[in-house]
Amino acid sequence: MPRPSKALLDRDRIGATALALVDSHGDFSVPQIARALGVQTASVYHHVEGRAGIIELLRSRIAETIDASTLELRPWDRALEAWARSYRAAFAEHPRSIPLLTMSQVASPEVLVQYERAVELLIEAGFAMADVMPVITALDNLVLGSALDLAAPESMWQPAPDGSTPLLERALAAVGGGRRADAAFDLALAGFLDHVRGLAASAAPA
Amino acid sequence: MPRPSKALLDRDRIGATALALVDSHGDFSVPQIARALGVQTASVYHHVEGRAGIIELLRSRIAETIDASTLELRPWDRALEAWARSYRAAFAEHPRSIPLLTMSQVASPEVLVQYERAVELLIEAGFAMADVMPVITALDNLVLGSALDLAAPESMWQPAPDGSTPLLERALAAVGGGRRADAAFDLALAGFLDHVRGLAASAAPA
């Protein structure tokens, strides 16, 4: 038996359509979503709380591909590293969503629960309470910058054809093929973890 | 005497129009630029090498607001830090340009010359040639992630109204007002510089 046509419209389809629009055009509008789903714009608004609600659907869809069980690993630095790697992979699939998501407040319950766990992890590790959000935010920034880079061309610089960038050419030639973005992320993540291990050690009671 | 109407169309106007479109919509098309400037789409193509050429105009426009003289400072870590701060401020003004620019190869001469200087700085500082691009790329990632964060709302998380994120609420309350993004960037940049100082020291001849 065919399902009623109303079933064509639900939060899941709205989120999937918005994400496809963002992936190809860098943005979405509610009328575009309605057109793609063959419904009236007003019908879309029956299912979501405006544009902000759709942005949270995008955030939830991408976040559900992050392996949140990484945050249960111990010690804390192993957990944070594994979470960062999974988080980067999830966003590298949808680089054009990144500015939309960073420019609006996180309200998605599926995402907030991951942050709650990350905060718990850092408190347990002995970080001073005032350091917890700066540490998490710095890791967010590193992950999102690296996710954009993972989605970037393997060969990111086109040395000047007039030969005015000889050192850049040499430095590019010295990097092993195929791991450009990973090498930079590994370096940045190692530096970040070293630095925050020091913060945790200095804040934790002896 | 009025200037001929042809002067309405030049690379500078095309770049400015593309940037305004990206700032508000996250993307641009050549017909949109032509419409905004009151010319035919084909006329735009007389001035730029297609869409990729316009992306490089965007890159040049934003990069020219980076203070490249920072790369002349010494010692090298002071130069790198000052460059990173100026680079972050420039991109924080145009967060929606970031995925477009990271997804295409850097060809803008004004930008390549900054990278040539950064490579020179790191070679002079004693970095192994194979580490130079990973160090620069890791810094790029950190800067672009932090630029997105600087453009983000001051209050980035909306704790769950059902009280299910009590630790997140405490951690947010412990951060001093007004410096959320700066605190995270300072932490990440300090960690990055500490880590790469170690790389330079281990690679440099004694």
Image: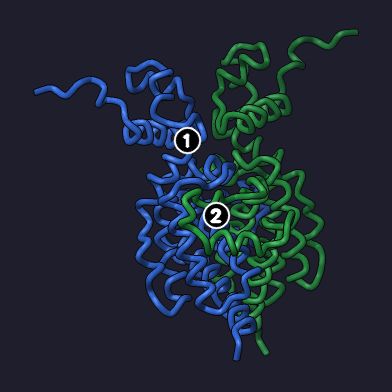
Chain colours: A blue, B green
Q: Chain of mark 1?
A: A
Relative to B139, does residue A22 appear above or below in the rendering? above
Q: Label 1: how many residues lie within 10 Å, few (<14), some (14-19) or many (20+)? A: some
Q: Is residue A45 visible from the viewing direction of this image?
A: yes
Relative to A66, does residue B124 appear above or below in the rendering? below
| Mark number, residue A53 | 1
Helix, strand or loop at mark 1: helix
Q: Label 2: how many residues lie within 10 Å, few (<14), some (14-19) or many (20+)? A: many
Residue type beneath disc 2: Gly
Disc 2: which residue = A145
Residue B4 quadrant: top right
Q: Measuring 52% from the left and 72% from the top, which residue is drawn there?
A: A122
Residue B9 image position (x, y, % from top left) = 71, 18
Viewer-proximal residue, B163 or B75?
B163
Residue B63 image position (x, y, % from top left) = 71, 45
A125 left or right of A69 in image? right
Do labels 2 and 1 touch, CB within 8 Å? Answer: no
- Farthest right residue? B1
Viewer-proximal residue, B31 or A28?
A28
Residue A172 image position (x, y, % from top left) = 55, 61
Residue type beneath disc 1: Gly
Residue A58 image position (x, y, % from top left) = 43, 40
Q: Chain of mark 2?
A: A
Q: Is residue A170 visible from the viewing direction of this image?
A: no
Q: Real-space Cα distance between discs 2 and 1?
A: 25 Å
Mark nearest the camera among 2 and 1 is 1
Q: Quadrant of the N terminus of chain B?
A: top right
Tell me which label, 2 or 1, sits earlier in the chain: 1
